Amino acid sequence: MNTYGIPLDKDMSFHLNGKNKAAKDIETHELSAVSSTTKPYSFKIPSHVIGGIDVLSSHMGISRNQFVNQLINTFLIQAFSEFVDGYSSEFVNQGKSEAQILLDELSRSIDGSDVSDEVIQFLNDETLMFIQEHDMASSVYLNLPSGKFEAE
């Protein structure tokens, strides 16, 4: 039933059409933000993994490329965080929070590389979002003199 009490067939409703259009518009927006500077990248993975990607991406109504891009965007910082956790567990961290350790390692990674400001912004944004989603710090702020993010 809609707000007027009229039963709706969800498979053929304007509501569903609107939701589908919104999903496509959101996907297009996400892709255009990324595709403006996309580069081809290829790698070899077992055929059964490709088959799994194809089955799941088809079921979700998206391309293999969109699916893999979303996987990478979703889990990139999680993978880095897990690495940092394992690495830092071997050292004394002088009372630093998990978030500060992650931010410090990200800074070290960026400092040792030759990447664009766009890459730095992407990694900072994704890391801050990861920290917030995982309640790793009560607050994260930009230390303006150093230009680096810090956590309390």
Image (cartoon, grey):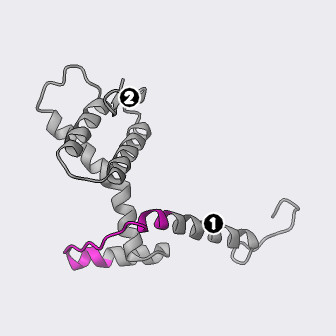
> Residue placed at 63% from the left, 71% from the top?
20
The image shows residue 12, relative to residue 29, as above or below, that is: below
28 displayed left or right of 80: right
> Residue placed at 37% from the left, 57% from the top?
73
Cα gap from disc 2 to disc 1, whole angstroms: 38 Å
Image-quadrant location for residue 128: top left
Tag 1 or tag 2, which sits nearer the N-term? Answer: 1
Mark 2 vs mark 1, foreground winner is 2
- List the single residue furthest toward the left: 90
Instruction: Give how far across and how far down residue 33 sits, in percent.
Output: 47, 62
Decide whether residue 109 is among the magenta residues: no
Decide which of 113, 94 is in the foreground and name it.
Answer: 113
Helix, strand or loop for disc 2: loop
Residue type, label 1: Ala
Residue 144: assigned label: 2
Decide which of 152, 16 is in the foreground and name it.
Answer: 152
Give the class, few, some or many, for how many residues have Cα within 10 Å of label 2's Cα (few <14, many ≥20): few
Residue 112: assigned label: none
Residue type, label 2: Leu
Q: Quadrant of the N terminus?
A: bottom right
The image shows residue 54, relative to residue 79, as above or below, that is: below
Instruction: Give how far across and how far down residue 99 sits, in percent.
Output: 32, 32
Decide whether residue 32 is among the magenta residues: yes
> Residue placed at 16% from the left, 33% from the top?
89
Instruction: Give the residues drawn in magenta, as a range.
Output: 30-51
Give the class, few, some or many, for how many residues have Cα within 10 Å of label 1's Cα (few <14, many ≥20): few
The image shows residue 137, relative to residue 8, as above or below, that is: above
Q: Which residue is mark 1?
A: 22
Instruction: Give how far across and how far down residue 68 sits, in percent.
Output: 35, 68
- List the single residue furthest toward the right: 4
